[in-house]
């Protein structure tokens, strides 16, 4: 039986890459905006920046991870999930989330209702990469201006229930916002629109991330080193098992050859 360690090596391939990013990054936090295609990622980024830094359209604009610095944060706009039939964009988005980012804003459009199976699957894939991923991300619900207060509360309750029962997260921080309402408030100089957009809560979260980035990275670095060490120990065990199997095969083969040789000698004698 041949034992293949290539699958096991994948366990820490991403960990090594992420550790490299942590060690060689500057002190600016890296935040990835992550979510399904056409759920408002680019509009959210434009609201955070206060101007149109990213194109938002009905056609796909982001097909690779795009990074841009703003207000001492490196923002990563990832390709929209579930838009590329070949899955290449999803792989790029996951790389942006797993390896490049210190923190994730997972974007979901409230007009779509509750989370779908694809989004929950992505959440679970994110969750297995660290024991504390719920502390490194929040779920940003967009387009809240399209729902009444009661409708929004119902959706929030349902999403929180989904996360608790159908994903590996026990809970997730949810921040409901209207990026378009905020941008309209800026454009028309109407502070009430900005206030009702809910985006001030998101800005508070960004400030917390900026203040805690060094501490957060140190904690993650410690976890990654332990994970890599554990994976290496597992691989060493597999290699030793394979060597023992091969050694036992050689011993068995040598015994069979000796036995056959003795039979031949006996027959000749």
Image (cartoon, helix red, strand yellow):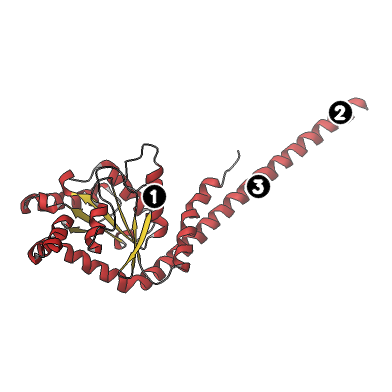
> How far is disc 3 from disc 2 in space, using C-alphas?
30 Å
Quarter of image, res 18: bottom left
Depicted 95 relative to depicted 264: above or below: below
User: Which residue is depicted at the point 73% across and 41% down?
Assistant: 250
Q: Earlier in the sequence, mark 3 or mark 2?
A: 3
> How far is disc 3 from disc 1 in space, using C-alphas?
46 Å
Residue 228, image x, y percentages: 50, 59
Label 1 element class: loop
User: Which residue is depicted at the point 31% across and 50% down?
Assistant: 123
Q: Are marks 3 and 2 in contact (CB under 8 Å)?
A: no
Q: Earlier in the sequence, mark 3 or mark 1?
A: 1
Which image quarter holds the C terminus? top right
Q: Are marks 1 and 2 in contact (CB under 8 Å)?
A: no
Depicted 260 relative to depicted 71: above or below: above
User: In the drawing, does residue 153 fall left or right of residue 245?
Assistant: left
Q: Nearer the viewer, residue 80 or 113?
A: 80
Q: Foreground mark, 3 or 2?
A: 3
Q: Residues within 10 Å of mark 3 (few under 14, many from 20)?
A: few
Q: Residues within 10 Å of mark 2 (few under 14, many from 20)?
A: few
Which image quarter holds the N terminus? top right
Label 2 element class: helix
User: Which residue is depicted at the point 40% across and 46% down?
Assistant: 91
Residue 106, image x, y percentages: 27, 54
Residue 64: numbered disc:
1
Residue 25, image x, y percentages: 44, 68
Residue 70, image x, y percentages: 31, 66
Depicted 26 relative to depicted 90: above or below: below
User: Which residue is depicted at the point 8% across and 64% down?
Assistant: 190
User: In the drawing, does residue 250 fall left or right of residue 152?
Assistant: right
> How far is disc 1 from disc 2 in space, using C-alphas?
69 Å
Name the residue carrying label 2.
264
Name the residue carrying label 3.
244
């Amino acid at each position: 039986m041949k034992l293949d360690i290539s699958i096991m090596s994948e366990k820490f391939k991403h960990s090594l890459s992420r550790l490299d990013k942590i060690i060689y990054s500057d002190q600016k936090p890296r935040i990835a905006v992550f979510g399904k295609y056409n759920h408002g990622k680019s509009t959210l980024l434009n609201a955070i920046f206060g101007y149109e830094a990213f194109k938002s359209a009905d056609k796909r604009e982001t097909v690779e991870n795009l990074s841009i610095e703003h207000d001492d944060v490196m923002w990563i706009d990832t390709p929209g999930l579930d838009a590329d039939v070949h899955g290449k964009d999803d792989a790029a988005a996951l790389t942006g989330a797993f390896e490049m980012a210190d923190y994730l804003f997972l974007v979901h459009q409230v007009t779509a209702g509750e989370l779908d199976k694809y989004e929950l699957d992505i959440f679970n894939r994110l969750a297995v990469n660290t024991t504390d991923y719920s502390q490194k991300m929040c779920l940003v619900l967009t387009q809240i201006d399209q729902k009444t207060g009661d409708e929004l509360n119902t959706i929030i309750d349902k999403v929180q229930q989904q996360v608790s029962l159908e994903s590996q997260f026990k809970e997730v921080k949810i921040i409901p916002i209207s990026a378009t309402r905020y941008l309209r408030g800026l454009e028309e100089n109407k502070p009430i629109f900005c206030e009702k957009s809910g985006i001030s809560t998101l800005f508070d979260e960004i400030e917390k991330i900026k203040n805690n980035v060094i501490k957060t990275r140190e904690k993650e670095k410690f976890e990654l080193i332990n994970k890599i060490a554990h994976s290496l120990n597992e691989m060493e065990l597999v290699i030793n098992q394979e060597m023992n199997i091969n050694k036992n095969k050689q011993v068995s083969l040598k015994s069979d050859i000796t036995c056959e040789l003795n039979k031949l000698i006996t027959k000749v004698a």
